[in-house]
């Protein structure tokens, strides 16, 4: 039944050959790799505006400046990642850069941060998509967490099914989104120049500033708030590292294409973010973290039924007029790009998890590909984790973004530090003056990148630590601990099980002493006896543990009557357990002849229904578990399929 | 760890010899067998009074008459059970009487009713005991369900530990209770005769009758209420059947002793119940089902903090004065006898369940004795069921008693019907005139018993069906269904597995084809190979399923390098599963030589921690499960104990 459901949801399995894929040409790679970075336009401007809005309307006018600061970091990161690609043209991403340069422990840290990031990418993208759905259908505003989870479920199923052949399907939504946004900004600019740009729906609101900013954006608190807006706005930078983790999937020349794509993503991201912020300022968009508390209309607080639309749809209304079509188109395009961003995480997480599992840092189950060639366990883990995160934070985009930025900048910072180390090491080997100057220049860029990303990280940590950021820290540290201890465990097992050249483990046991566990004289027992005899052991005895004397006597009598050609040994069991006397017996056998192998044949039923399993085999299970811990014992299950398992098959006749 | 806790709670296991017990002399058997019946004094008078109180104070004055009606039924049942003992002197109880005379299906019904009854005995006794605890410590009144559950837990642990040697420990509380109650009634009677009997604490209250009885106890509703009081009061009859189920434990002459004990229980029960009701009437005890709604003091409803004490402690205060000592002594004695009643159910239920499991009506796990010679699984099941029932009804004694009476009278009625059938059958064989007259007299008595118990059953069903009685009916019917289907299943399996004289199942497979499942070249695999070679199969091959080509190549190269003297077969796995190609291979082997036995050796790890289990053996488990369903395949697990299982043991060296 479960299998049938799985087939309906996921489809028939794919053959391994299907894995081979054509390399991605830049025109497809660009949209696919940029979905993560560009989709942040759906929420990063909102976060900048609503953070500044805490200090009132005047403060929000600073948003383009904050945007410029974010763009500066973006440029530094883009150019430093271009250096990284040039230095590691075969690709590998932050994990490999950090692992190579800073050692395995830092590698584990960056891997943990990346895994957490992918979970948050999915959580943020789907929650944000739910926000856009609610902008079109305000009645759904209270069900955003549920809608986000449904989106995650759709992504899980889609990824379990695996990709179809058309890679354009992933590229088109991104092109459409970029085209739409550029058009909106261009139309808005033209309207503004001609003086006919409309106002956003929220332009008429006043903002009641928080208590501490009653006198405006001043002093240390004001500076900190701008830093916070800057750090939250850094959500716009998430995802720019995607191309360097995927260099190997590009068409040749790979490194060059990757560098170009990076630059294109940086430019697009910068233009769109800055343009959006300018347009939002021009149309008077007001977004706040708690509309009912902070938004005033004619001096009155807005009602409980006011649903705050995201910045992009507000701009759509201002630019394309209040007819609703513009709004719906922009919402659909944005949901499309957010789905692509989430979808991309469903590629990256399982890939990285499989890579880590191969290195022994995660359970082996994450390593192998499922029916449809996706890493099914990784996909399922990511989906479950994302849904858990969404519900844990009740679909609150603002908090999720803090966690997200934190995770992303942990990996950025470590990656920059790794490259810094790389250049410093290189400098020792390089001699020529121009060559040294070039390396030093590159090192400087990474130093700037390191300082900037560490700054963002610090700001998020300091300002948001108690607002949930500690959870991301705990998540990353816990994951690191799990990865380290798993790795220790696997390595220890590897050492323990490695075969030396002396091949000592292959030494042959001298003789086989076979035991058949008997409870009554029934067909499964006779079959176990027959199978044990067929394996021609040096010695064979049937073992009856005397738990109930009446039953034992009956069984022994049946044994004699049927003339079964195997001696039966009755073991006394003063405490009525099966396993203890059996193990005592086995130990005495092994004491007498320590090089003997003891094989215990256990007749077992194969039953048809789960409840039948409850009323059979319980003793066999317990005995098997106990015997597992005895040295030098092999446990052989001789199954007997009850007719109820496959009504109408004739197992008896086919079995011999 | 679990094992250690078990040892602390339950103690070291007992040897089977300890099971032999001396027969019970009547002076010990009487109190042990009567605890169930006599303990009903703790709640049966209360139920009669509070049912009548629905029609106001005047109606409660009828309570001694209702008591007399209950006594009449008691007498009929006592004498008819004496007949039953005489007719079946080897004992056996209602289950055997009904099964013998009315057939297995009715036997199942009575068994189900009895099992439900035992659960309710425990639930009612412990809830009632909690009521007496609350009478002494009123602050605990709201925690009665919790206290009752703790009492059940104590009984479970006590019974898992098993009985000590002193059987007097079970007898003394009952003697003390009977002595105390008789003394209280006697002192009360003397005080009443001298005109100096005090009033009960609740004597000053008025009772506000229910709406429909505003004009007193009249008409059909009044008659029905009296019938209800009578049926609820029949709770006093629960447990009188205990002696006949335990005839075999008595000292000789068994049947005669059982008959005497029955009579003694009947007399004691009658005197105590009737005496209590008279005394309650004389001291003006008022108990109602909802004190806050129905009790008035000077025209005002009693406060929310009024805790209604049970009848027995109210009588203690009236007879021994308000000093509290009498109250405490009576409460302690009553809790004592209730504990003994609950404890007795912990004997009866597991015994009956084991009997039924032996007959194939319940899962086999209920059949065997545990470490301390008690039927541990039965004891645990009873405890869990009782606690579930207590919480399901939130510790409401009144509802529990309805269910209880219903279950008890199902078995009484069936038992009487069974005896009726018994005499009718006997009548066909008996010829002598006086003999026939005697049998006819006996049959008449059972007919009266049948009518009376059926009447009680009918009244409970009609008046309380919607008030929870349906649950008891559903419980009994469900249990019957489970028992019948289990029995069918076990019988079918028995038929299927029975060994005919032709002994066809013992036919020897012609040859053994051994396969060793290989994933990498590590010690556990080499050991599995060594063990497989030691069993000298006709053919031996190592099987490597090619899931990942790099790994496969490495393994095959290692195989050649180490010169392992077993050919390795690589199976292609286009869909990356281990089990499917292996099963295909096995099927092709069996197609070529259908009489061959295929033994699959699977190397397995034995790990130390539960989390290690999660990251090992998952593939082995899945493969084993699949192979289980293949005909003619034996699965042999070759365990390798990782060092972490037993830090410091040297398994490798001792294993060969």
Image (cartoon, coloured by chain):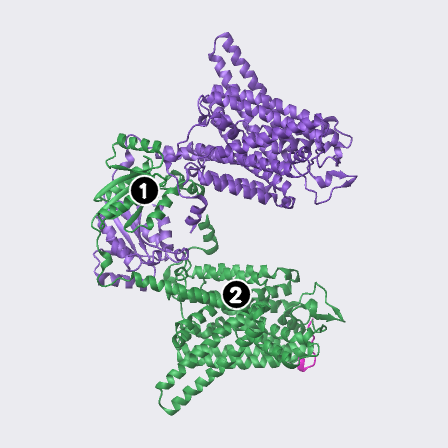
Chain colours: A green, B purple
- Identify the disc placed on residue A581: 1
Residue found at the very far right of the displayed protein: B299
Magenta highlight on residue A196: yes
Given residues B376 and A12, the one toward you in this image is B376
Given residues A34 and A388, the one toward you in this image is A388
Task: For mark 2, give the secondary structure.
Answer: helix
Label 1 marks which chain's residue? A
Quarter that holds the C terminus of chain A: top left
Indicate which disc, 2 or 1, sits on the residue closer to the N terminus.
2
Magenta highlight on residue A169: no
B434 on left or right of A547: right
Label 2 marks which chain's residue? A
In magenta, the rendered stretch is A191-201
Residue B116 visible in rendering: no
Task: For mark 1, give the secondary structure.
Answer: helix
Q: CA distance from mark 2 to mark 1?
A: 56 Å
- Identify the disc placed on residue A122: 2
Query: Which is the main secondary structure of the residues drawn in magenta?
Result: loop
In terms of image quadrants, where is residue A111? Answer: bottom left
Residue A182 position, x and y percent, is: 58, 76
Q: Tell me if residue B533 comes above or below residue A287 in the rendering.
A: above
Given residues A608 and A165, the one toward you in this image is A608
Q: Tell me if residue B411 comes above or below residue B570 in the rendering.
A: above
Residue A78 position, x and y percent, is: 49, 79
A117 on left or right of B568: right
For the point 68% across and 24% down, the residue is B65
In terms of image quadrants, where is residue B645? Answer: bottom left
B336 on left or right of A651: right
């Amino acid at each position: 039944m479960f299998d049938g459901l799985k087939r309906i949801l996921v489809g028939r399995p794919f053959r391994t050959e299907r894995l081979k894929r054509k390399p991605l040409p830049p025109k497809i790679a660009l949209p696919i790799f940029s979905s993560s970075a560009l989709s942040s336009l759906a929420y990063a401007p909102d976060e900048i505006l609503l953070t500044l809005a805490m200090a009132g309307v005047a403060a929000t006018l600073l948003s383009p400046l904050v945007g410029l600061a974010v763009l500066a970091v973006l440029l530094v990161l883009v150019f430093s990642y271009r250096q990284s690609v040039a230095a590691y043209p075969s690709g590998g991403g932050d994990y490999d850069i950090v692992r190579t340069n800073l050692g395995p422990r830092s590698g584990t840290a960056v891997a943990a941060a990346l895994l957490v990031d992918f979970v948050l990418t999915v959580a943020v993208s789907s929650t944000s998509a739910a926000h856009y759905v609610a902008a079109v259908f305000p009645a759904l505003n209270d069900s955003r967490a549920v809608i986000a989870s449904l989106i995650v479920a759709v992504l899980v199923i889609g990824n379990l099914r695996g990709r179809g052949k058309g890679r354009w399907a992933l590229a088109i939504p991104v092109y459409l989104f970029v085209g739409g946004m550029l058009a909106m900004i261009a139309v808005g600019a033209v309207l503004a120049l001609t003086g006919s740009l409309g106002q956003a729906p929220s332009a008429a609101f006043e903002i009641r500033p928080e208590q501490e900013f009653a006198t405006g954006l001043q002093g240390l608190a004001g500076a900190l708030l701008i830093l916070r807006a800057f750090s939250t706005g850094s959500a716009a930078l998430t995802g720019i590292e995607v191309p360097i983790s995927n260099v190997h999937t590009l068409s040749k020349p790979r490194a060059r294409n990757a560098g170009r794509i990076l630059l294109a993503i940086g430019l697009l991201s910068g233009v769109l973010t800055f343009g959006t912020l300018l347009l939002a300022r021009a149309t008077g968009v007001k977004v706040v973290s708690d509309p009912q508390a902070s938004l005033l209309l004619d001096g009155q607080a807005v009602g409980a039924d006011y649903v705050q639309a995201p910045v992009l749809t507000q701009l759509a209304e201002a630019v394309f007029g209040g007819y609703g079509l513009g709004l719906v188109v922009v919402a659909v395009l944005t949901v499309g790009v957010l789905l692509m961003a989430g979808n991309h995480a469903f590629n990256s997480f399982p890939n990285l998890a499989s890579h880590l599992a191969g290195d022994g840092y995660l359970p082996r189950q994450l390593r192998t590909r499922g029916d449809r060639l996706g890493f099914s366990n990784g996909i399922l883990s990511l989906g479950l984790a994302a849904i858990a995160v969404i519900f844990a934070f009740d679909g609150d985009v603002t908090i999720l973004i803090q966690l997200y930025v934190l995770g992303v900048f942990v990996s950025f910072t470590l990656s920059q530090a790794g490259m810094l180390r790389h250049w410093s090491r290189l400098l020792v080997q390089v001699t020529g003056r121009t060559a040294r100057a070039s390396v030093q220049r590159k090192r400087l860029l990474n130093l700037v990148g390191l300082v900037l990303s560490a700054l963002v990280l610090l700001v998020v940590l300091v300002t948001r630590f108690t607002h949930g950021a500690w959870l991301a820290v705990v998540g990353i540290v816990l994951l690191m601990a799990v990865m380290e201890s798993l790795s220790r465990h696997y390595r220890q097992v590897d050492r323990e099980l490695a075969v030396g050249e002396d091949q000592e483990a292959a030494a042959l046991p001298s003789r086989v002493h076979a035991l058949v566990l008997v409870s009554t004289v029934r067909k499964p027992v006779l079959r176990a006896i027959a199978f044990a005899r067929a394996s021609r052991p040096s010695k064979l005895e049937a073992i009856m543990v005397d738990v109930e004397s009446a039953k034992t006597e009956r069984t022994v009598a049946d044994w004699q009557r049927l003339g079964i050609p195997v001696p039966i040994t009755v073991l006394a069991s003063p405490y009525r357990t099966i396993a203890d006397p059996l193990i005592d017996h086995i130990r005495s056998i092994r004491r007498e002849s320590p090089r003997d192998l003891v094989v215990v044949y256990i007749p077992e039923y194969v039953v048809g229904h789960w409840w039948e399993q409850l009323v059979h085999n319980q003793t066999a299970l317990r005995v098997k578990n106990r015997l597992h811990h005895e040295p030098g014992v092999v446990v052989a299950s001789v199954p007997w399929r009850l007719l109820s398992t496959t009504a109408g098959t004739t197992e008896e006749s086919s079995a011999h």
